[in-house]
Each structure stands twice: as structure tokens, then as C-alpha cells.
Amino acid sequence: MRHIISVLLENESGALSRVAGLFSARGYNIESLTVAPTDDPTLARMTIVTSGSEEIVEQITKQLNKLIDVIKLLDLTSYPHIEREMAMIKVSVDEPGDREEVKRLADIFRGRIIDVTRKTYVIEITGEGSKLDAFLEALEPFPVQEVVRSGVMGIARGDVALQI
Amino acid sequence: MSETSASSTAITGAEIFVRSLQAEGVDLVFGYPGGAVLHIYDALYQQSEVSHVLVRHEQGAVHAAEGYAKSSDRPGVALVTSGPGATNAITGIADAYMDSVPLVVFTGQVPTSMIGNDAFQEVDTVGITRPCVKHNFLVKDVKDLATTIKKAFYIATTGRPGPVVVDIPKDVTADSCEFEYPESIHMRSYNPKVRGHTGQIRRAVELILSAKQPMIYTGGGVVLGRGSEALTEFTRKLGYPITNTLMGLGAYPASDDQFLGMLGMHGTYEANMAMHHADVLIAIGARFDDRVTGNIEKFCPHAKIVHVDVDPASISKNVKVDVPIVGEVEPVLRELIRALEENGGQPDADALKAWWDQIREWRGQDCLKYDRDSELIKPQYVVQKFWELTGGDAFVTSDVGQHQMWAAQFYGFDKPNRWINSGGLGTMGVGLPFAMGVQFAHPDATVGCITGEASIQMCMQELSTCYQYQLPLKILNLNNRYLGMVRQWQEFFYQGRYAMSYMDALPDFVKLAEAYGHVGMRIDKPADVEGALKEALAQKDRLVFLDFITDQSENVYPMIPAGAGQNEMILV
Ligand SMILES: Cc1cc2nc3c(=O)[nH]c(=O)nc-3n(C[C@H](O)[C@H](O)[C@H](O)COP(=O)(O)OP(=O)(O)OC[C@H]3O[C@@H](n4cnc5c(N)ncnc54)[C@H](O)[C@@H]3O)c2cc1C
Ligand SMILES: Cc1ncc(C[n+]2csc(CCOP(=O)(O)OP(=O)(O)O)c2C)c(N)n1
Ligand SMILES: [Mg+2]
């Protein structure tokens, strides 16, 4: 099963490689990993998307907790939560009619065109991974040049909060 | 973050290093100098509180520090230079990681301005050691040095112990600042649990008292956590059978009738059979290693399991347990004893009697028997004699192989911290440097190193260290002219195709010992074993290297072959 694990860790050099190293050394899946400092600059928050049996995910959370730099974590999958991912997509639009059609698709998916040249658009789109996948699928007929995805971020709904 | 002791005027990083070790109460550092640590060596030279032992290879320094830590209640400390010094230390660090040995290893590093430039003797020590340390640090500023050292000792010695590496660039040891050693430390990201959860303790007690065929299975955690006394009280109170892992030997007195011997791949018939038939398993400070469980599918098929461990990640890792208790063995065992008293219930006496009758029958198998009338020296006999002649009270280290298993099976340890070996990594070469560390921690004790002719050659050079410091070790080389453990597997599972398991062109160990300034003896008749051991033990101030020419074809029994269940042992 897919799990989204949010981790608060010391914002120190090396902390990221400890997490990445843990996943590779123990052969855990890692679908995506995002990390950035929080409002408290001594803390970093990481969102890891992983998958595995219940036993494996239990081990993953225990092993993460065991890392000295990790302060706290939350398996968001156990709570009502929101997940979001952002993508920036560069697509060529120099065939006749493409500009209008791509713009229309972007609107349908609530994407925004954030860069325009004579030959290309860059579209910004945010949502759950499945929405991004669907949008990319819709763009299939067009020559997509580049796709940049942020990886998943998540947060629990309501009172549940990952904080120290 | 922390309280600090009185400050003083600015001193160099090298001096801060030394003063920090003094503040930690470190009396001994095992190490080897080099460019990146010269300032530190200079500072060590100018004081006398912290002694330094010069080894002959950095691997030896780390293993010696392990031996020191494993046999005492203090962490081991090693100091090596950057680059090759650090890489030579890796095997020791990995060994300490696998066996949870509290260690602080200091490595020199190139100056901060040169890090990342492929400078002379630069390696990414923090990167290389990351997967085999409990934690590591690169100190980039002299102002962080004292606090980092404090953290390193704190992390290494608390919770599940382990090695911590502190990488110190050379310029940091030259820079100065005021020295303040924190008296205590608090880390928001690290708070190991000590006491068990009360509700879980109560559930555990109910399960324990409901048992008809109970079994207590304990490991290295009891030795590491100094839980031996509490374990003995707990076990005697219940009257249940108990087994120890290879790492847990000595935590419960081997001479006690409730002790069934070691379990696992080369464990006793009775211990493994009792595990297989148990209905309640009480696991304490043990990690369900594959050498213990055999085939996981067939492991303890009837048992409900209580597991006490300070590391939550050890619990339900390999085997799903019913009552997990996260905490330190000593306080948790005390809590269990109290909860047993409060519960007031008693074990089912009739069931227990029937269970012991069954266990005695298994014991009757006499699974550790060997040919006592052989013309050749049986390795088991040597260990048994050594046990007899030392009153079972020596410190014993071993290397890795058949001799290690015979040492574990035939030297009955009645006390913890007496049996020093490499279980998790299974590192050949540890025996001699381990023994050095033990002798430094216990200068007047008898320290034996039970080794094999292959293992001993992996850190042979330390015989020179032993001479320099006049360590009166007794080295028992069970010389079977084979990589015996490898040969045994080839005999059993590769139809006797002995690929590369024969030790050709062995040195003359007697002459070798003598060349290093020690006493060498070669023994090739069973009748001479006892006399030789007595003579060696009588030489209180000399290292004696006893080269026992043993039966080449001897195998370690019982044996659970790979993939088999605990009840499927190969017996003699
Ligand atoms: C050639 C060879 C053959 C071997 N054959 C066998 C064999 O037949 N039988 C056998 O048993 N082993 C054997 N081993 C050793 C095996 O590989 C493992 O090292 C060993 O079984 C692990 O022992 P353990 O479970 O006691 O764990 P350890 O490695 O000693 O781990 C200790 C456990 O206790 C926990 N702990 C630590 N401190 C505390 C504390 N204060 N409070 C609570 N918990 C704590 C830790 O978190 C950990 O889970 C063999 C090794 C070799 C090299
Ligand atoms: C560093 C290292 N290399 C290889 C091995 C694999 N190995 C395990 S036991 C063994 C043979 C040990 O031979 P010896 O020291 O003579 O002991 P014996 O088994 O003969 O008693 C080998 C090669 C190991 N454990 N460690
Ligand atoms: Mg051998």
C-alpha cells in the first residue's frame, strides 16, 4: 500500500543523505521525496511517498524514527489529509490550433500558463498526483518538451499537526 | 540547550579535544597517528590523564576499543588519521554497529578549506561510515567541538548503544576558542525510552503466567544493559527454562540447571527443541537474528511472544510479536518482577513439571558429545580444559569460525561481559585486538583468545602492540589447517569440494610468537594439552601463544542447516 510519511528533522547538512541512505540500504521503495526548511529554520520538513506491506511500512517509520536527526514523523495515510503536487510542463505549441487547444486543456485542469514564447508554453499545475497524471495524458497529442514534478507534499486535515 | 561548566581562556581545538576526553573520564584511547591528527597527538603528549595505546593497524585500534567497552562499563575510544586511517577503521566500526558496542571513533580530516578537493588523504569519512554508525558528525567550527564530543558520548552510550564517528578537520584542531564542556545534554531529536509501558508489563505478566511450556530467550541486550542480576532473579522466580544467544552468553549463569545452553544454528538440541515447542516465548534484549530463528516460517510455531527491547525497530522486525515492550532490560525486568508479585499468580506447577521432564529427555541426547579417546587433539577438549583450569572465570575472546562456536559451547560463562566475540558482522581478526582491549580494562585478569590459524593472521601484527604494552594474553590457536567453518559447509553442502578452504603454507606460529618477543608453544598430543595450558597460565606476565594442532576433520554440532526449522538439527 502507498503511504505518505511526513518527517520533521534537524535542518542539518547530511540529514537528507541519512534518510536517502536508509531507504537504499534497506531496500525500501521511495516514490518521491521532498524537503525544505520550515518556518523555523533549524527544522526541515520532508514528505516521503513510499509503498510496502504494513510490516515494511512499520519498519520504515521505526527506522526513520531511529535516525538521530529525525525529531518526529507522521504517517499521513492514517489520518484525513491533503496531498498536493506541482508540475511545470513545457509544451511546444507551434502547430496551427495547438495554442488554443492547450490553453483550453490547461483551463479545464485549472492549470496556469506561466511562460509564453512564440513556440512554447510553460504550464503550472497543482493537485493530487492522479490529476497531474491525467493532465499529462490529456497533453499526449502535443509535443511535451519537459516535465518537472515537485513530488508530493502533504498535511493532515483539522487538529492533527506535526510540530514540536 | 545545556548547562556548562566553568569557562576559561581560549585554547586550541586539540586541547579542547583532550580536555573533553578528560571531562568524559576517558582514561585510554586506542589509536594511530598521521598528518591530520598531529595537533591532537601533540596535545595528548603534553598531559597524562588520558593514555594512548599505539596499535599496529587502525582496524586493531577500533577492535581493541570494542574489547575494552564490551568487557567494562565504559565506552571505547579510538583515534585515527584521515583517509587511509579512517578507511582502515571501517571494519571495526561496522563490527561495533552490528553488535551495538558503545564506541566513539575520532577521525582526522583535511582542513575545512580543502574538503571536497580530493586533497591529500581525504575521504568522505562521514559518507563512508554513515551506513555503519549510530550517528556521525563533521565538526566544521572549533566552537562546536566540545558540544559535539559530549553528544557523541551521550549517543554512543545510551539507548541501543553503538559507534559514533566524529570527523575533525585539521584546522579545527588548530583554531582556538574558550572551552566549556557541557555538563549535560538534551537533544530534541533523541530521547531513548528507558521504562516499559505499564499496561504492556501487565499484559506480559498475564501471558507469562498462563504458559504451559514457557521459554526465556535472551540476548546481547541483557549484557549491554547490565540486566544480568535482574534476569537471574526473574528466571529463578519463575523456574522457567532459559537460553542465551551467542551475544547473550554469561547474562545467565551457564552452570545453572535452568540454563539450556545457547540456541540457534549451533545451539544445543534442548534449547532449540524447547524453542520449537514453546507456547510462550519471553524474548529479552535479543533481535531474532536469522542464525537464531532458522527458517522464519517454521520459527516457534506455537508461541505467543513477549519482546523487551530498547530499540523499537528490533521489535516485530523479523518475527511478529504479541506483547512488545520498549524499554531497557534492567528497569523492565525489575518492573516485570514487581508486576509478577503484584499479580500474585503462580506458574502452572504441573504443566511446568511435565515441560521440564520433556526438556530433560532432550538433554539426554547429550548433543555436545565428542570423541574423548581420540589420538588427535579435539578442539572441544582444549576449550573445556581451559574452562576447567581458569575456574570458568577468565575473559575469553574469540575470532570467527568453528573455534568460535566451540568456545561458545564449551566455555560455560557464569558472568556477563566475559565473552567477547563478533556475532553480527562475524569479523575474522577481532580476537587478538579484542583481547588487548579486555586486558587494558582488566590488567590483572586472565584473558584468553580462542582463535583459528586463519583468523589470527588477519590482525597478527597486533602481537607487536602486545609486546610493547606487555599484555600477558593467552592465545589458544585451534589450528586445524583449514578455514574450518568454510570447510564444514563445503563438506555438508558442496559434496566435499574444498574450494580455497585449505590454509597452505602456514607460518611457524611458535617462531612467530618468539619473533614478536612472546612465548610460543606447539602442542600436538591430547595428553599434553592440560600441561601446556597450566604452564601458559603460570606465566602471569608473558603472552603465551599456544598452537594446538587439532583434528582437521572435526565439525561443529548440532547444526541447523539453512532453510531448516529449529527442530531440524544435524546431530553428531
Ligand atoms: C559463525 C557464526 C555462527 C553463529 N551462530 C549463532 C548461533 O548458533 N546462535 C546464536 O545465537 N547466534 C549465532 N551467531 C550470532 C548471530 O549472527 C547474531 O549476532 C546473534 O544471534 C545476535 O544476538 P542477539 O539477538 O542477542 O542480538 P544483539 O546483536 O546482541 O542485539 C542486542 C539486542 O538487544 C537490544 N538492546 C541493547 N541494549 C539494550 C538494553 N539496554 N535494553 C533492552 N534491549 C537492549 C538491541 O536493540 C538489540 O535488539 C553466529 C555468528 C557467527 C559469526
Ligand atoms: C573477514 C572475514 N572474511 C571471511 C569470513 C568468512 N569465514 C567465516 S569462518 C572462516 C574460516 C575461519 O578459519 P579459522 O580462523 O581457521 O577458524 P576455524 O573455522 O578453522 O576454526 C571464514 C573464511 C569472515 N567471517 N570474515
Ligand atoms: Mg582453522
Image (tube, coloured by chain):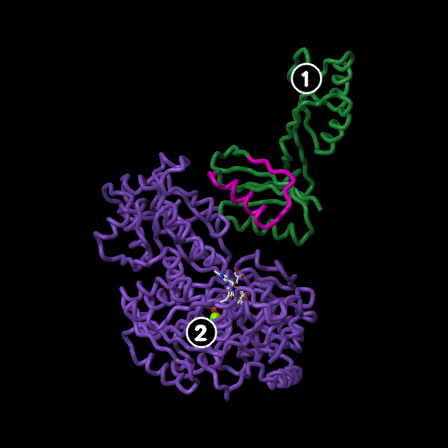
Chain colours: A green, B purple
In the displayed structure, would residue A143 be above or below residue B325?
above
Figure quadrant of the N terminus of chain B: top left
Taking depth in this image into account, of A155 and A44 the one nearest to the observer is A44
Q: Is residue B389 visible?
A: yes
Residue B265 pos. (x, y %): 59, 70
Residue at 63% across, 38% down: A32
Chain of the residue under the numbered disc 2 shown in the image: B
Pointer 1: what residue?
A121
Q: Is residue B155 visible?
A: no
Taking depth in this image into account, of B541 and A16 the one nearest to the observer is B541
Residue A91 pos. (x, y %): 70, 20
Judge left or right: residue A30 versus residue B545: right
* Residues at marks 2 and 1, CA–CA distance in whole angstroms: 76 Å
Question: Any mark on residue B479, and which?
Answer: 2
Figure quadrant of the C terminus of chain B: bottom right
Q: Nearer the viewer, mark 2 or mark 1?
A: 2
Q: Assess mark 2: CB under 8 A from ligand 3?
A: yes
Residue A138 pos. (x, y %): 77, 25
Q: For residue B315: magenta?
A: no
Taking depth in this image into account, of B336 and B82 the one nearest to the observer is B82
In the displayed structure, would residue A1 be above or below residue B279?
above
Taking depth in this image into account, of B147 and B123 the one nearest to the observer is B123
Residue at 64% across, 16% down: A115
Local secondary structure at mark 1: strand
Judge left or right: residue B428 versus residue B182: right
Q: Are marks 2 and 1 in contact (CB under 8 Å)?
A: no
Outermost residue on the front side: it is B505
Chain of the residue under the numbered disc 1 shown in the image: A
Res B91 quadrant in image: bottom left
Q: Amino acid at mark 1?
A: Tyr
- What segment carries the magenta color? A12-35
Instruction: Give the tally of numbered discs.
Output: 2
